[in-house]
Amino acid sequence: MRRGETTEQGRASREGILDAAVVEFTSKGFRGASLKGIADRAGIAKSGLFHHFASKDALLGAVLAERTAAKRHGASEDDFPEGSGVIDQMRQTVERNQFDPTWLRFFTIMIAESFTDEHPALPVIQARYRAVLQDLESRLRAELPGADEQNSGDIAALIVAVMDGLQILRLIDEDFDMRPPFRMLQESLDRLADTPR
């Protein structure tokens, strides 16, 4: 935080930088994005950006850590009404991404770029997918009687693959509606929910 800046102003400035970084990284990719471009989008001087983030790597790390929880698969309970189940959270995620694909675009670009040499996002994305799969597997066992220790990992992987596939199709074709195919997935999961333990 800069001298003379209140805590609230510092927080707002940091949030503005994170928002601008998402737009810049999505537009130009990590390597094509510049700190000056991000600062310009945030409406601050480049020196002001350095008060919050020491480098472009640090800024990307903050975006991935702070702005992506529960934005991709709906596998975390964050940002959802208390008591909502994992299937309902995925449905809400599909609804949100259908009409606002901002995060979809950002994530897809970061995932694709992360496989290039020494990309700073790769360890974060690998850890994120491991966490998503582990959390989803655990919640499936808790919520769906048909999911058990033998099959819950495979079901979780299938859900993530289907969700990713639908989201990529949405980015390729803005007229593509993810909701009908997701309903087919939901019907299959509902049948697991009705399976006696």
Image (cartoon, rainbow, N blue to C red):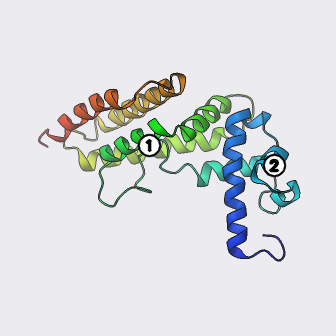
Residue 43: image quadrant is bottom right
Label placed on residue 155 = none
| Residue 42 position (above or below residue 125) | below
Viewer-closest of 7 and 138: 7
Query: Which quadrant: the N terminus?
Result: bottom right
Residue 189: image quadrant is top left
| Residue 29 position (above or below residue 55) | above
Find numbered disc 2 in the image and state the secondary structure of the residue it sits on: helix
Residue at 72% over, 54% down:
17
Image location (x, y in percent) of residue 75:
41, 46
Image-based side of 102 in relation to 97, left or right: right
Residue 26: image quadrant is top right
The disc labelled 2 sits on which kind of residue?
Asp
Q: Looking at the image, is mark 2 or mark 1 earlier in the sequence?
A: 2
Image-based side of 87 in relation to 167, left or right: left
Image location (x, y in percent) of residue 133:
43, 41
Viewer-closest of 96 and 140: 96
| Residue 82 position (above or below residue 18) | below
Residue at 46% over, 24% down:
175
Evaluate whether residue 120 shows in this view: no
**Alpha carbon of mark 2 to alpha carbon of mark 1: how far?**
28 Å
Viewer-closest of 131 and 168: 168
Image location (x, y in percent) of residue 176:
44, 24
Viewer-closest of 142 and 56: 56
In the rendered image, which residue does mark 1 sit on? 96
Residue at 57% over, 40% down:
102
Image-based side of 122 in relation to 51, left or right: left
In the rendered image, which residue does mark 2 sit on? 40
